[in-house]
Amino acid sequence: MFLPNNIMVTGGAGFIGSNFIHYLFNNPDFQGRVINVDSLTYAGNLENLTEIAASVGEKRYFFEKADICDGELMEALFKKYEVDAVIHFAAESHVDRSIYGPQEFIRTNIMGTFALLEASRKSWAGRKDVLFHYVSTDEVYGSLGETGYFYEDTSFDPRSPYSASKASAEHLVKSYFHTYGLPVTVSNCSNNYGPYHFPEKLIPLMVANAMEAKPLPIYGDGKNVRDWLYVEDHCTAISAIVNRGVRGEVYNIGGESEKNNLEVVHTICEVLEELYPLKDNPVVKEVSPGLGAYEELVTFVKDRPGHDRRYAVNCDKIKKELGWSPGTDFPSGLRKTIQWYIDNPGWVENIRSGEYKKWLEKNYDSR
Ligand code: NAD
Ligand code: TYD
């Protein structure tokens, strides 16, 4: 049984939020309603939810185009839908963008979380049968060397405007638990990958670029390490926390799949050659007929400023206390992801031909 009935999913039109909505409606234990609150920034894409809107209909799925920073509107939505849980995904989420323009990160990630917390506190007025779940990141813990892991009690040491804004909001969420008794839970997860991932992040960018015979830009020496979590496993982890997690507690979520960026890109090129061989790729034939292997597209570029070297989370707590573990290993998760991008070229094309193209041309010319 999935406990809350009326779940406000903020950022539900983004990558993880839309996967979470799919996950909920594919789960027969969930019989409640979802209110997707999203302002549709460049990263919000209602195409991610076309099937849900069609299959679930208007009785259990609602979309509200709204800015989480608008506290009055959030309160009105709480009332309108009798919200009893918030799963808070909405954020500016890309480190590179936070370097080019941090302001929106401060506004949405900090002020937006504050506005939602206030709306929750006022609307729920001391109720204990409700939940505010904050989707945080392992990046709040900083950067690791070659060994060691982030634990739930590791001190915060954020290095980018993105991670600093997420850390700041996480502090606020915890303060509402201690000060006002607001029932909250927090999860700090590692790098997600899977369907509907916006093609500005490493994995979808490399897949989409390779399919179009474009350069695969590797920052620095390519030896930075991330722990990769298949997005569906992230959804099952959040579900476990919402249903069984102790209020006021923090849970790390990881994929137990540490890879450096060069390894990731190398594997993408290998799998792509198997699933979408160069010889059958019409774009390659047209724009780069001499290309001998996807790997030849790898291009080393200037490093990201303040580039965190390694992230790795220890997720023993959620495993032991809530019985969760990541169900998808990296090779099979990556294969499913690449197949999804091969099967959905229109989804990428729609993104790449619009506002995002203009932004790229403006900001990435120098690379
Ligand atoms: P995303 O960028 O794909 O989606 C973010 C969504 O939030 C978009 O639909 C956007 O329109 C919406 N949004 C942005 N500003 C808003 C505002 N002011 N009001 C309402 N909606 C707004 O992000 P994602 O990758 O799906 O990440 C979701 C959450 O998970 C974020 O909080 C992020 O920090 C966290 N997280 C992501 C990862 C990852 O690997 N992607 C890892 C750890 C944590
Ligand atoms: P990214 O997907 O942006 O996630 P995060 O910075 O939040 O971990 O980047 C993942 C890793 O890939 C990170 O070490 C930066 C690197 N990277 C590249 O080398 N080239 C790229 O074009 C991008 C987007 C990322």
Image (cartoon, rainbow, N blue to C red):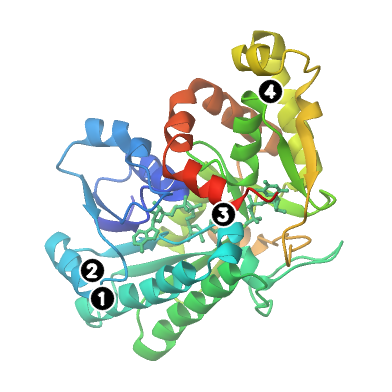
Disc number for residue 74: 2
* Lower position in the chain sequence, tag 2 or tag 1: 2
- Report how far apart the C-alphas of labels 2 and 3 lie in the structure: 34 Å
Estimate how packed mark 4 is, as few (under 14), some (14 to 19) or many (20 or more) residues with alpha carbons within 10 Å: many
Dot 4 and dot 3 residues touching (CB under 8 Å): no
Q: Which amino acid does label 1 sit on?
A: Ala
Which residue is tagged 3?
323
Instruction: Note whether residue 264 is visible.
Output: yes
Q: Name the secondary structure under disc 4.
A: helix
- Report how far apart the C-alphas of labels 4 and 2 lie in the structure: 43 Å
| Rendered position, 168 above or below 46 | below
Which residue is tagged 4?
272
Q: What residue type is labelled 3?
A: Gly
Q: Name the secondary structure under disc 2.
A: helix
Q: Name the secondary structure under disc 1.
A: helix
Q: Where does residue 43 sit, x and y in percent of width and height?
A: 43, 49
Disc number for residue 119: 1
- Report how far apart the C-alphas of labels 1 and 4 lie in the structure: 46 Å
Q: Name the secondary structure under disc 3.
A: loop
- Report how far apart the C-alphas of labels 2 and 1 lie in the structure: 6 Å
| Rendered position, 164 above or below 224 | below
